[in-house]
Image: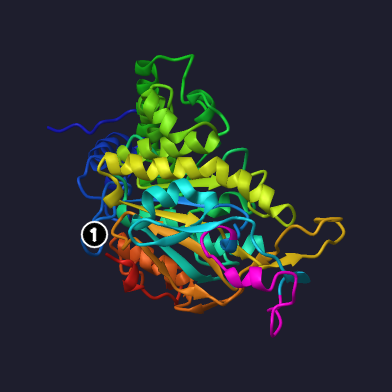
Amino acid sequence: MNVPFENPGWSRWSRREMLQRSGMGLGSIAFAGMLQEAMAGENSPNPLLPKQPHFPVKAKHLIHIFANGGPSHIDTWDPKPSIEKYAGQEIPGGAPRTERPTGNLYPSTFQFKKYGQSGLEASELFEKTASAHADKMCVIRSMHADVPNHEPSLLLMNCGDPRQVRPSMGSWLTYGLGTENQNLPAFLSMCPGGYPIQESQNWQAGFLPGIYQGTYIDTNHETVDRLVEYVVNHKQSRGSQRRELDLIQRLNAEHIQSRPQDPMLEARIQSMELSYRMQEEAMDVFDVSKEPKHILDMYGPGVQARQMLIARKLIQRGVRVVQLWHGQGQPWDNHDKIFEGHKRLAGESDQAISALLTDLEQHGLLDETLILWGGEFGRTPTVEMPKKGSNEGTISGRDHNHYGFTVWLAGGGVKGGQAYGATDEFGFKSVENRVHVHDLHATMLHLMGFDHTKLTYRYAGRDFRLTDIHGRVIQDWIA
């Protein structure tokens, strides 16, 4: 005879209640198993596991060197001898409307010469990069953006939209590809000295799950425990941390049973695991002091050299996207004393950029790493007139120019040794083979293995993409 279980302290459970209350144990088992799945679907507990792109390509990683503030193309990568010819005169036919009144044509003081077998022309400011790598570079001289203001132009270049909250390019790539190293962030943004204009929006996940957000690193710090806060736990052993994290994750597994497909909760769970796993690998990857002396000498001194060396080490370990900011604090935004400012900034970065390309090539990584250099727009070929609060008392700078500017690509399936497109005679507007930022993004996604019209995410009843409803792939850039 069966006697029903009776206990005054317990109530009878229905089958549903039984499953819910035992969810902690069953959920933790399932959670641990799913973390090890070889493939990660969109709703997988580990969405950063490697995924295949739409079609096979060489490029697997992206390094974006962001020249913050808008470098002058006519002083770096776009020679304009006609400015010298008409120096001090108004532009024949008049200048396009700019953000502020500008003066007459203002020639560059920097010399241009041809480099490599391709004869690619570049300024002396980037002599080291051009002399070693001209034949690997696709210099795009016909870029244009939407407006001459930093905030919307930064967001356009980084996120594909100048106004709305949209995922950054790095977030789109980690969403589409995952990462090859589960012990380091998939997408890092290294910006020395604090956030740039628009702050973390430049590497935001937007409406994508939070796990795809870029991880910010302040590379003004040199020691690993300052670069990555709390990476060293001085109070607990590794074993004690592991036991504590296991308990928390078992509770998380129970919690998530009643909140399926909660991207914020999933991102927090993943972040905790990643923080633990980073402790050993981060101590190595962010510490450049152990690199051979000839490598340190090749990159040179300074913050830019150090963060570019770190970028190579991150790519070597399978990190998907690394963004390197240059010009924070004293940006390329030289409204006055442009020649002094640009000489200083190029001096901080030229040797390090050249070393990065050389180092990637020596490690067999250049072919699988796409490199982008550039800012959010260019600068005018005319001098900016002094005004209260900006370049007051001087006539030695250039204003913002979104009508025409230059970026360059290298590595990752890029057809090098070419200058694509052209600005007008004076470098004010792109006129030949014009390239919008959407076209740049579409082509970069193609180089990374994606049809930009099909890398989408459904949000608010609409399928969104990095290029919105625009963009075209420029086949001339592809090897």
How many numbered marks have been drawn onto this rendered protein structure?
Answer: 1
Instruction: Give the colouring mode of the picture.
Output: rainbow
- Residue nearest the observer in this picture, 179 or 339: 339
Q: Secondary structure at mark 1?
A: loop
Q: Which residues are magenta?
A: 75-97
| 243 over 342 or under it: above or below | above
Quarter of the C terminus within the rendering? bottom left
Residue 243 image position (x, y, % from top left): 35, 21
**Does the magenta portion include 88?**
yes
Q: Say if the magenta span includes residue 442.
A: no
Q: Residue pushed farthest bottom?
A: 93
Who's the residue at 57% across and 66% down the image? Answer: 164
What type of secondary structure mainly makes up the magenta span? loop
Up-down: is 210 above or below 247? below
Residue 314's quadrant in the figure? top left
The image shows residue 381, relative to residue 115, as above or below, that is below
Quadrant of the image occupied by residue 377: bottom right
Label 1 is placed on what type of residue? Val
Q: Nearer the viewer, residue 330 or 138?
A: 138
Determine whether, in the image, residue 30 is placed left or right of residue 286. Answer: left
The residue pinned by badge 1 equals: 57
Q: Is residue 465 visible?
A: no
Residue located 32% across and 42% down the image: 360
Q: Residue furthest left?
A: 1
Lateral position of residue 334 relative to residue 477, left or right: right
Q: Residues within 10 Å of mark 1 (few under 14, many from 20)?
A: some
Instruction: Identify the residue at horizontal 43%, vertical 67% (top origin).
Output: 440
